[in-house]
Amino acid sequence: MSEHVQTTPIGHHDPSEGFDRAEPNVTSIWLFTILSVVSLVVILVALQQYFVKIWSDAVTEKVLTAPDSQLQMVRGRDAWDLTHYMYLDKKAGQIRIPVDRATDLFLQEVAQGKPFYPGKPTVPKKEEPAAAATTTPGAEGATPAAGATAAGAAAPASAPAKAPSAKDSSAKKATKKK
C-alpha cells in the first residue's frame, strides 16, 4: 500500500536571471487607485446635483407655478403691488409704499425708539390673590367645611364689584333728567 510518489526537487532561482522590475509598479497602482476614488466621488457629486436640480424643477413646475393664467395674472399684480409706489387716495394723502421701503422705515423708527402701537398704553392689572377662606361668625379661628359659607358672611375684599347693568345706567339717567 505504500505508493511511491516521485517528487522533484524544487529548483532555486538563478540569480543571473534577475527579476522583472516593471511588475508590480506600486506607484502606478496607487495612482490608479487614487484617480479611481476621485473620479467616483466626482461622478457621485455630479449625479446628486443633477437629481437635486431635476427634483427642484419638477416641484417648481408641478407645485409652485400657477396652473391658470388668471392666477398668474393675480400673482403678478400682487407682486407689482408689493414693489411699487401708488396713490390709494390722493385727497386723504394715502400712498402705498413697497414692502422693502416700509420695512426700512419701521426699522429706523424702532432704532430711534418710537415704534407705533395703535392703542393707548395701559398698565396691566395686578393679579389678585385667591379668595381667603371665611370663618363662621362667633367662632374665631374656625374654618367652614369645603364649599360651605357662613350665613351672612361678607364677600371677600378681593372680589370684583358687580358691573352696572344696562337697566341700572338707564334708571340713573332717567333720575338725572327729572
Image: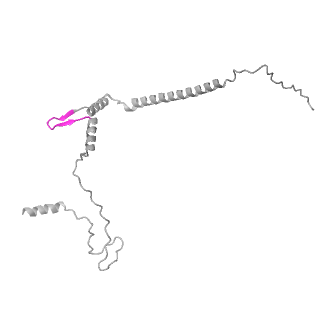
Picture quarter with the C terminus: bottom left
The picture places residue 83, in percent across and down from the top left corner, at: 27, 32
At x 42%, y 29%, the residue is 57
Q: Position of residue 131 (x, y in %)?
A: 31, 67
Nearest to the observer: residue 174 or residue 48:
48
Residue under the image location 25 percent in, 44 percent down: 112
Nearest the eye: 165 or 41: 41
Q: Quadrant of residue 86?
A: top left
Q: Is residue 140 left or right of residue 62?
A: left
Placement of 41 over or under 144, stated as above or below: above
* 153 relative to 106, above or below: below
Residue 58: image location, x then y, percent: 43, 29
- Name the quarter where the N terminus is drawn: top right
What kind of colouring is applied to the model shown?
one colour
Residue located farthest toward the front when viewing the structure as drawn? 16
- Comparing 163 with 133, the one in front is 133
Q: Nearer the viewer, residue 94 or 72?
A: 94
Which residues make up the magenta segment? Answer: 86-98
Inspect the magenta stretch and tell me whether residue 87 lies in it.
yes
Residue at point 11%, 61% (across, down): 173
- Which residue is depicted at the point 39% across and 32% down? 63
| Position of residue 50 measured from the top left corner of the image (x, y, whole percent) | 48, 27
Q: Residue furthest bottom?
A: 138
- Tell me if residue 79 is in the magenta stretch: no
Residue 89, placed above or below residue 120: above
Residue 104 quadrant: top left
Considering only vertical position in the picture, is 135 above or below 169?
below
Q: Residue furthest right?
A: 1
Seen as rendered, the residue at the extreme left is 178
For residue 174, side relative to residue 145 (left or right): left
